Image (cartoon, rainbow, N blue to C red):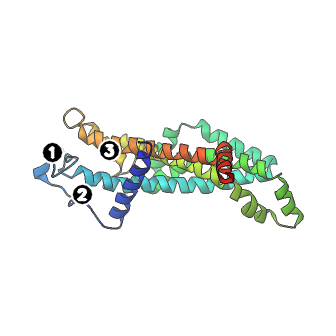
Amino acid sequence: MARLPIYFIALLAALTLAYALGFNPIPYQYDLVDPDAILQAPSWQHWFGTDFLGRDLLVRIIHGAQMSLSIALLTAFNALIIGTLLGTLAGYLGGWIEELIIKLIDFIYSLPDLLVLSIIALFLSQSSSGIILGLAFINWMDLARLVRTEVKKFKNEEFVEATRALGLNHWQIISRHILPNTVGSIIVALSFTLPRAILAESTLSFIGLGLSPPNTSWGTLAGDGWQYLRTDPQLLFFPALMIFLTVYSFNYFGDRLQQAVSPRALDQHLLIAQT
């Protein structure tokens, strides 16, 4: 039971990758309209049923996974670049640069996330690039604060002072000796960024400010299924279930990573290694 989230992530990744490579395990296309199969209940022919245009819901969920996970991964990557860069500058240089970056972080934190995402989505015509840009804009601050704290902790360590004495420049010290020591904490932070990005994209798409047709994500599927909640609840249930399971799995994975890189867990690993 404890490993169920790991198995779910592996299965979801395998289905999404297979679909992205052109292998569709289901004999339907995500945009195939079938007037004779409108709003069918789950059956052996359509495992998750069909939507209001007769399209197979299961294949649309797999197609939506490709978009939802792509947006989450690209959001995490952009947040990694921005957060690591600004956090490193703040932690290593200090002074007025650190104060400026901290004030910028506090300012962005004061903005309502949904308002920022809505404005960016409207200006960029609800495109996937606009959603990724908006999600990265509201998700880099935690990572920047984490990197700043880690860099400030390591920059005065003896091994860093030794590298300065050897004549290494700032870039060499940061890239070779400081940032490698923060990788574990950064990976943990990114594992929590992914579910937040999935939830944020799903929320935007659910209220009609996310992806525009013909693009499909779990949020757009849930938004389309909401109006059929009373008559065909499976149209909302299955996309919402996928969002829940994915977010839960990534959060579980992040918790396990956090335990693995914590000092207590490190001491336990060392004790096991010694015995």
Residue marked by disc 3: 239
Residue marked by disc 1: 40
Front-most of 223 and 100?
223
On residue 102, the disc is none
Outermost residue toward the left in this view:
36
Say what amino acid the circle numbered 1 marks. Gln
Crowding around mark 1 (Cα neighbors within 10 Å: few <14, some 14 to 19, many 20+) is: many
Crowding around mark 2 (Cα neighbors within 10 Å: few <14, some 14 to 19, many 20+) is: some
Q: Earlier in the sequence, mark 3 or mark 2?
A: 2
Residue sitting at x 74%, y 51%: 151
Crowding around mark 3 (Cα neighbors within 10 Å: few <14, some 14 to 19, many 20+) is: many
224 on left or right of 7: left
Say what amino acid the circle numbered 2 marks. Asp
Say what amino acid the circle numbered 3 marks. Pro
Secondary structure under tag 2 reads loop
Q: Earlier in the sequence, mark 1 or mark 3?
A: 1
